[in-house]
């Protein structure tokens, strides 16, 4: 998994709004038809996210969501290697972007840019300092999209050792400033 970061103090002048209206959703009712457009796991996962206070930023067209992302302040599950995951706690100045999605027929039309812009300004206004997003190394499109939005890559090396039957994790961050994403 690649970890990408975007500082929230870098100004948002380069992020255009494209004239779309973005809503902030906090219950399953607000997701309406989106669950039908998503994978079978989506409804259950979205309900769990809302129950822990996560927000969904969504762009609607004719009442239906065409693009959205989730924002969480809770620990994020990071796969370390097959069958081993780590619950990465976020510090109070970090918000994590999860599950960015645009319905296929609207991709490339700047729908996600509009959603991202609303999300960026919301958390910037609340004095958060950075956004994290985890992206699989083979998701080249998402890596390119987030690179265009200004993200850079952070190397997060998690070492896991087993002590008295418990997994203990050590994280080493290598913030090579503005590391190339691809
Ligand atoms: C990633 C995703 C949400 C992007 O949504 P989108 O609405 O198509 O994105 P936008 O149209 O707002 O594009 C944002 C920027 O990325 C660029 N971009 C979009 N798709 C691209 C592609 N396939 N290749 C290269 N650049 C691309 C756009 O040109 C735009 O840059 P610009 O402002 O300089 O023109 C969408 O591709 C998607 O739903 N993918 C499947 C789910 C997924 O992988 N989610 C990410 C999980 S980490």
Image (cartoon, grey):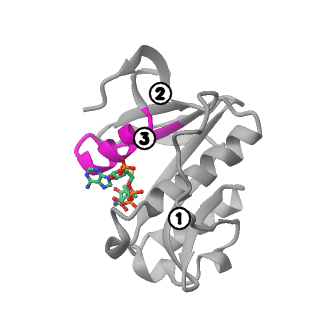
Mark nearest the camera among 1 and 3 is: 3
Label 3 packing within 10 angstroms: few (<14), some (14-19), many (20+): some
Indicate yes or no: mark 3 CB to ligand 1 under 8 Å. Answer: yes
Mark nearest the camera among 2 and 1 is: 1
Q: Quadrant of residue 179?
A: top left
Q: Secondary structure at mark 2?
A: strand
Q: Secondary structure at mark 3?
A: strand
Query: Magenta span covers which residues?
Result: 132-151
Label 2 packing within 10 angstroms: few (<14), some (14-19), many (20+): few
- The residue at the point 44 percent across, 34 percent down is 151
Task: Give the vertical position of 36 relative to 172 (above or below).
Answer: below
Q: Position of residue 112 (x, y in %)?
A: 46, 59
Total of numbered circles in the picture? 3
Question: Which quadrant does the N terminus fall into?
Answer: top left
- The residue at the point 57 percent across, 50 percent down is 117
Q: Which residue position is annotated with label 3?
A: 134
Q: Which residue position is annotated with label 1?
A: 45
CA gap, disc 1 to disc 3? 17 Å
- The residue at the point 32 percent across, 75 percent down is 105
Q: Which residue position is annotated with label 2?
A: 167
Residue closest to the eye, 172 or 13: 13
**Do the numbered discs 1 and 3 sit on residues whose CB atoms are within 8 Å?**
no
CA gap, disc 2 to disc 3? 22 Å
């Amino acid at each position: 998994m690649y970890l990408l970061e975007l500082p929230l103090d870098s100004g948002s002048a380069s992020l255009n709004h494209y004239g779309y209206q973005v809503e902030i959703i906090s219950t399953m009712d607000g997701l309406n038809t989106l669950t039908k457009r998503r994978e079978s796991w989506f409804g259950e996962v979205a309900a769990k996210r809302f129950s822990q206070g996560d927000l969904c930023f969504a762009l609607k067209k004719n009442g239906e969501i065409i693009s959205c992302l989730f924002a969480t302040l809770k620990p994020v599950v990071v796969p370390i290697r097959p069958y081993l995951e780590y619950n990465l706690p976020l510090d109070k100045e970090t918000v994590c972007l999860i599950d960015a999605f645009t319905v296929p027929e609207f991709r490339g039309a700047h729908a996600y840019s509009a959603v991202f812009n609303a999300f960026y300004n919301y958390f910037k206004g609340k004095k958060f300092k950075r956004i994290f997003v985890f992206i699989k190394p083979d998701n080249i499109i998402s890596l390119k999209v987030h690179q265009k939005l200004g993200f850079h890559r952070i190397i997060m090396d998690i070492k896991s050792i087993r002590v008295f039957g418990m997994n203990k994790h050590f994280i080493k961050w290598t913030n090579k400033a503005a590391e190339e994403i691809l």
